[in-house]
Amino acid sequence: MKVIALVMFLLLFFSSLRVTAAIETVEVEFEREYGSQDVREISKGRIYYQAPDNIKVRLTSPIEQYITIEGQNVLIYYPREKKAFKIVAKNPVALPFFQAFLGMTRQDYGMTNFGYSLSSHEKKGETLITYWAPPKPLSRLLGRFKLVYVSQKLVYAELEDPEGRIVCQSSYNNHICYDSTYFPLQISSKRRLGENFVFENIVYYNPRFNEEFPREVVYFKIPPDVEIEEIRW
């Protein structure tokens, strides 16, 4: 039950993030490594984000794939196989590993937006540590959230369960600054799922903010001869 609660929290939390008005578009390449002790997979591609909730992903490895996310609708297209799927969800869909990047535009990393409240903080020199209490409906399943900033850069975050055990922790490195906001180009996370751990390492390359997307991205459409299978989730 706690495992399900953690996964649902992460999905809902990241889907609740919205970037500031100063960021209209983001284009960035990525390499994502995800797995556990026994399984490891690496994916590469490019992400195109347009505020407030339009995301396009072109995956180039290990397979060629196009993903479009608009609110509750997800469109997935495999050009080589000539297959396409439209997923209609009950709630807005997010791309968690990219929303972690966008979350930097929120001064509190979006904590209050999801119902968390600031319980205490510590400041020493250029280091600021804030502690956040979970909303009451989730307090039986989730514990406090901790954020660590150094020189205004978010460098570490962790989520505890109600017993104070760490169930998810992330580190943020290699920051760049755009419009007074520091974005990490490397994010490494470790998450407990039951008795096991899963890890995720993400590297972002060549980010571009508030620039026009290529025409093939703006006007991308699935070929008319490809049948789209609809799935409700």
Image (spheres, helix red, strand yellow):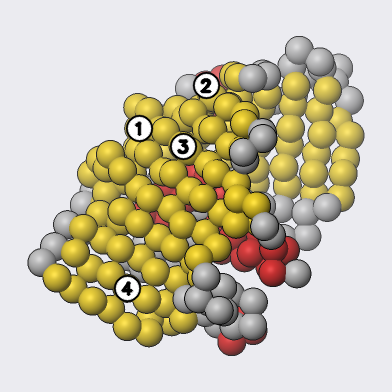
Query: Could you tell which of marks 3 and 2 lies nearer the N-terminus?
Result: 3
Q: Nearer the viewer, mark 1 or mark 3?
A: 3
Disc 2 packing (10 Å; few <14; some 14–19; many ≥20): few
Residue that label 2 marks: 215
* Image quadrant assignment for residue 65: top right
Q: Nearer the viewer, mark 4 or mark 2?
A: 4
Residue 125 lies, in percent from the top left, at 10, 67
Residue 211 lies, in percent from the top left, at 36, 32
Q: Residue at x 54, y 33 (%)?
A: 33
Residue that label 4 marks: 130
Q: Residue at x 47, y 30 (%)?
A: 30
For label 4, the SS is: strand
Query: Could you tell which of marks 4 and 2 lies nearer the N-terminus?
Result: 4
Query: Could you tell which of marks 1 and 2 lies nearer the N-terminus?
Result: 1
Query: Could you tell which of marks 3 and 4 lies nearer the N-terminus?
Result: 4
Tell me how far mark 4 sits from mark 1, CA to CA: 30 Å
Q: Nearer the viewer, mark 4 or mark 1?
A: 4
